Amino acid sequence: MSAAAPTWTAERPIVELHDVHKSFGTVEVLRGVSFSMMKGEVICVIGPSGSGKSTLIRCINALVPINRGSIRVEGQEVNDPALDKLALRRKVGMVFQQYNLFPHKTALQNIMMAPLHVLKQDRREVEERARLLIRKVRLDGKEDSYPGELSGGQQQRVAIARSLAMRPQVMLFDEVTAALDPETVKEVLNTIRELAEEGMTCILVTHEMGFAREIAGHIYFTDRGVIVEHGPPAEFFASPKDERTRQFLSQIL
Amino acid sequence: MRGALPVLLPFRAPERGPPTLTRAHLVMLAVALAALAPAALAQASGAPLSPLAVVWKWTPLLLAGFGFNLLISFAAMAIGTAAGFGLGLAQLGSSRVLRGLAWALTQFFRNSPWLVLLFFAMFLIPFQVRIGGVTIPLPDWLKAIIGFALPVMANVSEIVRGAVRSVPTPQWESADSLAFTPRQTMWMIILPQCIKRMIPPWMNVYSLITMATVQASVVGVTEMLTLTGQVHAAEGGRPELFAPLYGFALLCFFVYCYPIDLMTARLERRFQVR
Ligand SMILES: Nc1ncnc2c1ncn2[C@@H]1O[C@H](COP(=O)(O)OP(=O)(O)OP(=O)(O)O)[C@@H](O)[C@H]1O
Ligand SMILES: [Mg+2]
């Protein structure tokens, strides 16, 4: 446990990055990224392909170890050789583009597995919570379906529920609608919107500009491993200052 | 060397005389025999038995030998699978040293001729071991089982490694992000997903090892091929008996292994579709 952890209070940023550097071999993917956000905030990270967005959010739950800099979640330093991974991953939930559900388990079992086997919580209580989560993501009746029997949008909502079952403080979403049919994108975005409205702290990497504009309190634009520009959505989309941002937005909008 | 040590003579039919065994089995198979009996009896008086009648006469003994081949194959498969599973997991483990060692062992035993491994097992494993005050004999057939278990182990090790590797890495990542430990991930998430994929290649190894068990005859274990040779000799080594007798051995293995191969191919196709 990091010494700072017990002293964290909600007046301090819940996620705080300072000068984060990350290289894969000789390729510098993150070249000094800093930002911070408060509990309950929703931020969106946008940027061209390969600019390091996925790497950035994967650093936050230590899926990717960083080379230099500091990442704090509720005061816990992530860039620490003695990191308590379990404590960190209880706090930070993650949803992937390809859902990554466990194919040999039903929807309900997917949601129950981690609380049961990682947190060793009581089965009855876990099952009750899992059923509530299934309802929350509007998948009533799909409890006993296997991932292969669900549509992409349904699988992604199970994946969100699975992550929520750990009762995280922060949710990371990495282009979670990028692999979906246009019709099912909406279902998933609705689920995320509801979460955000309930006050969940969310970091979203997304190409859905409309959704980003609507939901985010702050937008970060990354290019080649740095944050080029950021601001509240109204300002960011109306009058981007940086040339690269303008170019990106003109291509995507 | 072997003649001096009774412990090394576990399944030596000739010493007791094959006819005893045969007669007992003949009684059991009397009904089936009746079909061929007239032909055999007709020649019993003077002329030598027809090749088919000879095969028929010795069928119980030869089948008992075949049963022994199967026994060797089951045991070798069981031991080899258990050891191979461990070795395969060691190949995927987090310890660099263990990983390297498991890899080297796997490669070594996978790329050695099975007969050479069998010889090594026969001559390197002592004929008995003392544990405390107890002497446990290690008869030839047991050593042969170990000799066959070695290549099974190496092949199963590769099957396990390949199957685990075939599970996409995002499965590991999502388990990791849910705070599963690597061990939990392996046993609860990865292995249950890929166990099905291991079955066809595993059955393939089984079919191969079953056919290979006849090599045990080379190192003096009495199994079907040994018995076939002895029967041939007992019948005076008549050249016209060669093809029927050895053909019968071939037939036994074919009838046993071919359905396994068919099933393997079917499972392979079924798992591929998914
Ligand atoms: N594990 C890895 N090993 C080596 N290089 C990697 C690895 N992961 C990412 N990279 C490289 O890092 C760079 C940034 O990748 P990243 O996935 O973070 O980009 P991204 O902004 O998420 O792109 P996209 O919009 O396509 O998802 C890319 O050039 C990629 O090739
Ligand atoms: Mg990405």
Image: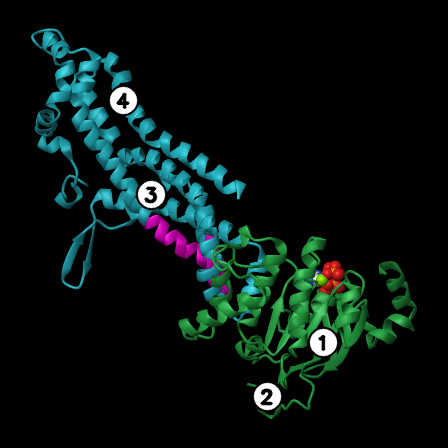
Q: Is residue A115 above or below residue A158?
A: below
Looking at this view, is A209 or A203 the one in front?
A: A209
Disc 4 marks which amino acid? Answer: Phe
Q: Secondary structure at mark 1?
A: strand
Chain B is which colour?
cyan
Question: Is the residue at mark 3 from the same chain as the one at mark 2?
Answer: no
Residue denoted by label 1: A42
Disc 2 marks which amino acid? Answer: Ala
Are the two marked residues, 3 and 2, in contact with CB atoms closer than 8 angstroms?
Answer: no
Question: Which quadrant contains ligand 2?
Answer: bottom right
Residue B181 seen in the current view? no
- Name the residue: 71% across, 77% down: A68
Crowding at label 4, few (<14), some or many (≥20) Cα neighbours within 10 Å?
Answer: some
Question: Is the residue at mark 4 from the same chain as the one at mark 1?
Answer: no
In the image, the segment drawn in magenta is B79-104
Residue denoted by label 3: B148
Lower position in the chain sequence, tag 1 or tag 2: 2
Q: Secondary structure at mark 4?
A: helix
